[in-house]
Amino acid sequence: MLYLKRRGFDLGSVKMPEQTAMPSASAVKQAWQSDTAIVLPQLLSQDIEKHAKNIQKSYVLMQNVLRTCDFVPFLEQNPYLEHIQQNFFIVAASPEEHDEQGIEKVYFDAFDKNDDDVVAEELWCKASWLSFHDEDASLRFRFSWGMEGYEDVAADPLKQTWAGKLCDIIFPESSTITQNDTILARLSSILGKKPSFVERIVYFNAPNGGAQMHHDVERGHAGVVFAQLSGATFWLAIAKPKLMDEIISFVSNPQHQADIEAVLPQAKDRETLIKLCERLDDLSCYMEEPDHELVEAIMDRCPAFIAQLIERGFAHTLEAGDVLLLPQRDLENCVWHSVFTLGDTPGEALSFAVR
C-alpha cells in the first residue's frame, strides 16, 4: 500500500500498481497512437550509475537554491561557470518578483566558439517553486527562450535547440534521455523521424509535493518523456476522453455524493458540476479554462475519485531508472496526468517535450 499526500491534502492509502515488464517496440507504438501512457521500467538504471556524480551535484544545487532562494550565484561558480562559458555567457538575472512561484530567472546568449558570433539570444533557465504550499519544497528548473507565457515554442527550432544544449551543460544527466538508444528508437518509430527534445524541465519533487492533474499540449509537440533519476513518484495518467467519462460516472453515482460534498461543500457548485457533466462539449471546454476548480476538486482532492482511477488501471509508480511516455496529440485526446511524491527526500526527474 502507498499513502498519498500532496500540498496538505491527505488522500489516504492506495493499492500499489502492479510492476510491468518492458513493453515491446510495437506495444509502445500502439500505446502512443492510442493516447495511452506507458512505462519503460528500469530503462535508465545503467545510465543513472554512470551519472551518479552529476545527479548528486544537481541535488546539491537544488539544496543551495532552496536554502538561499538564489540561483545565479551558484552558476557563476565552478564547475558550472567553466562549462557554461564554452558556448554561453550569462546576460542577466531576474528575481521574478512578479511571479509568486518564481525564484530567479537567468538569461543567456549562445555563441559559436569557433568565431565567437552570437547564434541564439534570449535563452533562459528559471528556478521556481512548484506550488504555493508552505510545506511543499518542490522545485523545477525550466529551460526555454523569449517572453515567458507568450513564447511560441514551435516558432524557433534553433533557439529551442540551444536552450536544450544549455540544459545539457547545467544538468549533464539530461543525456540519460537524449542519448538513450531505446528511447530514440521508439520515438523515431512513432514520429517517423529522429525526435528533438525541447521545453526541458528538471524537477525535484519533494515530500508533500507533486503536480495536479493537467496536460502538456503545445503547438509542435507530440508528447513528453519523463525520466525518474532518483526518488520515486506515483502517477495517474489518462487520456482526456476517458477522464471525462470517469468524472461523469463518478458525479452521477449516488454512492459518491458524500465524497463530492466533502470537496465541494457549496450546493450551487455541485449543481453546476452536474450540469457541466450533462454535455461532453461543455465539460471539455470547462477543463481547458485556467480556473476549473469544480473538476479540480474531484480530480485532485477527492480520495474516492483517485481510488476509482487506480481501480480502472490508470496508475503508475516510477522508481529511479523508470521512464514514462505521455502522448499529447491535441487538446481533445491528450493524456492528462497527476503526480505524487513518494518517500522522505526530494527526487530528481527529467520532463522533456518531444518535437
Image: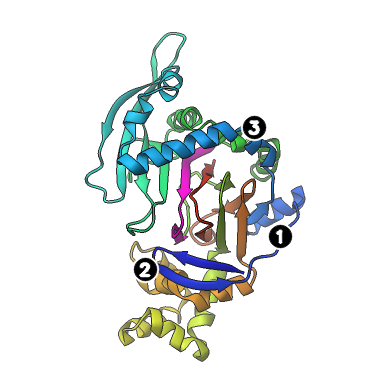
Q: What residue type is labelled 2?
A: His
> Marks 3 and 2, Cα distance to the nearest angstrom?
43 Å
Q: For mark 1, does the 10 Å Cα neighbourhood hold few (<14), some (14 to 19), or many (20 or more) residues?
A: few
Q: Which of marks 1 and 2 is in front?
A: 1
Residue that numbered label 3 is attached to = 50
Residue that numbered label 2 is attached to = 292
Q: Quadrant of residue 35?
A: bottom right
Up the image or down, 137 lies above or below 81; here it is below
Number of the label disc, if any, that sits on residue 19: 1
Q: Which amino acid does label 1 sit on?
A: Gln
Secondary element under disc 3, as helix, strand or loop, is helix
Q: For mark 2, does the 10 Å Cα neighbourhood hold few (<14), some (14 to 19), or many (20 or more) residues?
A: few
Q: Residue at x 33, y 65 (%)?
A: 291
- Residue 254 in the figure: left or right of residue 176: left
Which segment is the magenta one?
Answer: 197-213
Residue 250 image position (x, y, % from top left): 52, 81
Secondary element under disc 1, as helix, strand or loop, is loop
Up the image or down, 132 lies above or below 222; here it is below
Marked residue nearer the N-terminal end (3 or 2): 3
Q: Can residue 245 be seen in this view?
A: no
Q: Looking at this view, name the residue that lies furthest to the left.
A: 97
The secondary structure making up most of the magenta span is strand
Marked residue nearer the N-terminal end (3 or 1): 1
Residue 99 image position (x, y, % from top left): 26, 48
Residue 318 image position (x, y, % from top left): 61, 54
> Marks 1 and 2, Cα distance to the nearest angstrom?
33 Å
Placement of the C terminus among the 4 image quadrants = top right
Up the image or down, 271 lies above or below 25; here it is below
Q: Which residue is drawn at 36% across and 56% down?
A: 131
Q: Which amino acid does label 3 sit on?
A: Lys
> Marks 3 and 1, Cα distance to the nearest angstrom?
25 Å
